[in-house]
Image: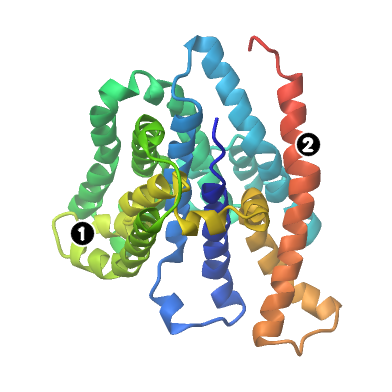
Amino acid sequence: MKKLDALTSLRFFAAYAIVIHHSKDFLGREVALLERLPLDQAVSFFFVLSGFILMYVHPRIEGTRGAARFIVARIARLWPLHIVTGVGLFYVLYRKLLFIQPIKSYAIANVLLVHSWIPKMSVYYAFNAVSWAVAAEFFFYLCYPWLARDFARTWRAKLAASFIPVVAFSLFFNTLQQGPGGEVWGMSPPDLLYINPLSRVFEFVLGMCFGMAYSRTSNRQPSGRGFGPTLKEAIALLLACVSIYASIPFAVAIGTTAIGSGATWFVHSGSCVFFGLMIYVFAFGRGHISRALSIKPLVFLGELSYAIFLAHQIVLRYFADIKKKLHIEALTGWSEYALYLALMFSIAYILWRFVENPARKLILRLSPKKA
């Protein structure tokens, strides 16, 4: 099976967009352009890419045993690093007792990777806040064996059905909104339209659709590189960037309609179609942009993307304490940012090298072959 190195490198740029999104406030990196860009849409890119890759690698899941093997492999991919960063690293950095009430119940939800399924901020942001996206991914993986079944015939119905929660939650808030921020029964629009996996599964199924399209057409494309493929890559990249930039104005416009609460979904996920198109185009790897993305250093950084994503915010929040301990309070601006990045990348590499890879291999080796 062909390795899609350009997509691996794009994972790094998406993870780094999340790093910038969170660090610009903590480190004073206030840039006017960045303030107008919803860089957290990189999470949407990950959701679309995940569906694309799974449909490319696992177009069919055969029977109960096949589904069990698939889920075990996905747990081996997600769970060890989530536990180490969400519980272990949190304890090391903050020296806090985790298993006391009410934290105990939050910890259980985190360990089971279901915390983003619960529409309560104190639950889905507990410990390592960014791991809500990992819990959403876990939900997608549990659904995948059913989603992939006869997908070539049922993709239209499944894609349409996956968008129903977005519309339903939007109407729910617009119809029954109470209190500040359009809250309903103590829930706000972000609880259901940003964090909850039911409202994000559309992006995953959309990625599956592009993955199916790629599998059908990849062998029909002529070999070689040239101006045409490079132009397609440039256009796809430009469309994705323009879509991100236009998301906030479009969300404002949506906010005045009958499903105004849907603006919450759009500002975080509104570029998903263009992300899917970009992933599809870059998967062929025939343009000079994808060729540049396929160099080994960028592919390596792409391999680190999961560790970067899970480690960066914890390191960021602890960075102020490290500055004091190392007596480097005078560092500001780019020097401060560079030091943070060096620390964050170092920890991400350690986690990837000594936790993520070994733990995944160990779980797969110990799991029953027929499970």
**Circle 1 — which element?**
helix
- Measuring from the top left, give residue 192's x and y in whole percent: 36, 48
| The C terminus sits in image quarter | top right
1 and 2 marks in contact (CB < 8 Å): no
The one nearer the camera, 268 or 346, is: 346
Q: Is residue 349 above or below residue 159?
A: below
How crowded pointer 1 is (Cα within 10 Å; few <14, some 14-19, many 20+) is rated as some
- The label nearer to you, 1 versus 2, is 2
Q: Residue furthest left?
A: 258
Q: CA distance from mark 1 to mark 2?
A: 46 Å
Residue, x 45% and y 65% (percent of image)? 39
Kindly indicate the quadrant of the structure image that contains residue 343. bottom right
Q: Answer left or right for 14 relative to 154.
A: right
Q: Which amino acid does the dot numbered 2 rest on?
A: Pro
Q: Answer left or right for 108 relative to 240.
A: right
Residue, x 44% and y 20% (percent of image)? 60
- Measuring from the top left, give residue 176's x and y in whole percent: 21, 51
**Circle 2 — which element?**
helix
Residue, x 77% and y 74% (percent of image)? 321
Q: Is residue 71 above or below residue 370?
A: below
- Which numbered tag is attached to residue 358? 2
Q: Is residue 179 visible?
A: no
| The N terminus sits in image quarter | top right
Q: Is residue 277 above or below residue 242?
A: above
How crowded pointer 2 is (Cα within 10 Å; few <14, some 14-19, many 20+) is rated as some
- Which numbered tag is attached to residue 184? none
Q: Which amino acid does the dot numbered 1 rest on?
A: Gly
Q: Is residue 102 visible?
A: yes
Q: Which residue is mark 1?
A: 260
Q: Is residue 336 above or below residue 260?
A: below
The one nearer the camera, 111 or 21, is: 21
Residue, x 55% and y 76% (percent of image)? 25
